Amino acid sequence: MSTLPVVAAVDGSDDSLRALDWAADAARRRGAPLRVAHVRHHSAWTPPGAQVPAPPPPEGDPVLADARARLSGEGASGVVDVEYAGLDGAPGALLPALGAEAGLLVLGSRGRGGFASLLLGSNGLSAARDAECPVVIVPRPDRTVDITLPVEPGPRVVVGLKTDGPDDAALALAFTEAALREARVHVVAAYPWPIQSWVAPGDLPVTVYDQDAVEHETRTLADGFLAPHRARHPGVRVDTVPTPGDAAGLLVAASRDAELVVVGRHRRRLLAPARMLGSVTHAVLLHAASPIAVVPPAPTEE
């Protein structure tokens, strides 16, 4: 098991304290250190002639003091080591940078700044898009999912699988998390239905698709991609659910009562070299009811 730390970003908000609880539990399960970081965003502009106040040292940081107090009881029980760090600068830049030396970076869905109506803060979006490690966003407990899927009770780690372009890094994290949590992996393999046939004006579509055949092919492809992960985690049960419909909507529906939803970050493309989240990942971040892990592609895939 990797000894890279689990990093929890805190800013004193209730959202970040919930993320801290999740990160402490993740560190305990991994036997990994826990690093608690507060990025203090001091204004870069001051009136002419005014004295710029020095930022507080880490030991005098009230946000980190609150985090220490929260972890002083049962919150950090079983955590190998806890470190506190106060950083000064722009959170949108410094938070993703924390992922360079982390196994997981954990944030709340919203911080102290921004608008109350936002579903996800800008810092969470920046970290999920740019960090080099998986980023876990812990949503508020009042998120609701209107559509639910018929699933068997019990702990689940949900992961989306594109059979035309599987994300091996996301699958690997889903199986690892399921093993750590004694949960099963719930694989959502969405396929489009009805399948649209594009023809020239005046022509008639001649291809007829059988839904049972499409579903069978989707399951067969999914089983092939999952085989190496099953071999590495033989004790983890896997439920593969080929389902017609929109992948984002199905993953959000599956997030209800799940331990975690795992999605991949968009791979870089030749004509779009910038890092992007992708429409499915973005929708899941905004609407899933469970914590969401956004996994960057392996370096060779980027």
Image: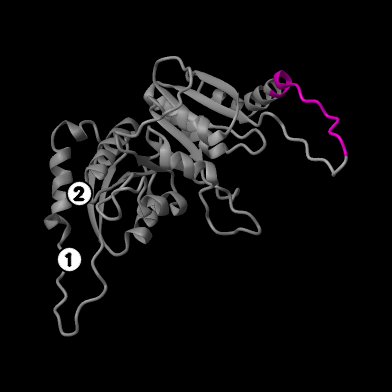
| In the image, residue 185 above or below residue 6 | above
Instruction: Classify residue 129 as left or right of residue 43.
Output: right
The residue nearer to you, when weighing 113 against 297, is: 113
The residue nearer to you, when weighing 24 against 52, is: 52
Return the residue found at the far right.
203
Return the residue found at the far bottom.
49
Task: Give me the residue at 40% from left, 52% from top.
Answer: 127
Disc 2 on helix, strand or loop? loop
The residue nearer to you, when weighing 183 against 103, is: 183
The residue tagged 1 is 55
Magenta region: which residues? 203-214
Residue 87, x across and y down, in percent:
26, 60
The quadrant of the rendering that contains the N terminus is: top left
Residue 6, x across and y down, in percent:
33, 42
- Tell me if mark 1 has few (under 14), some (14-19) or many (20+) residues whose alpha carbon lies within 10 angstroms of its own: some
Disc 1 on helix, strand or loop? loop
Task: Give me the residue at 36% from left, 59% from top.
Answer: 92
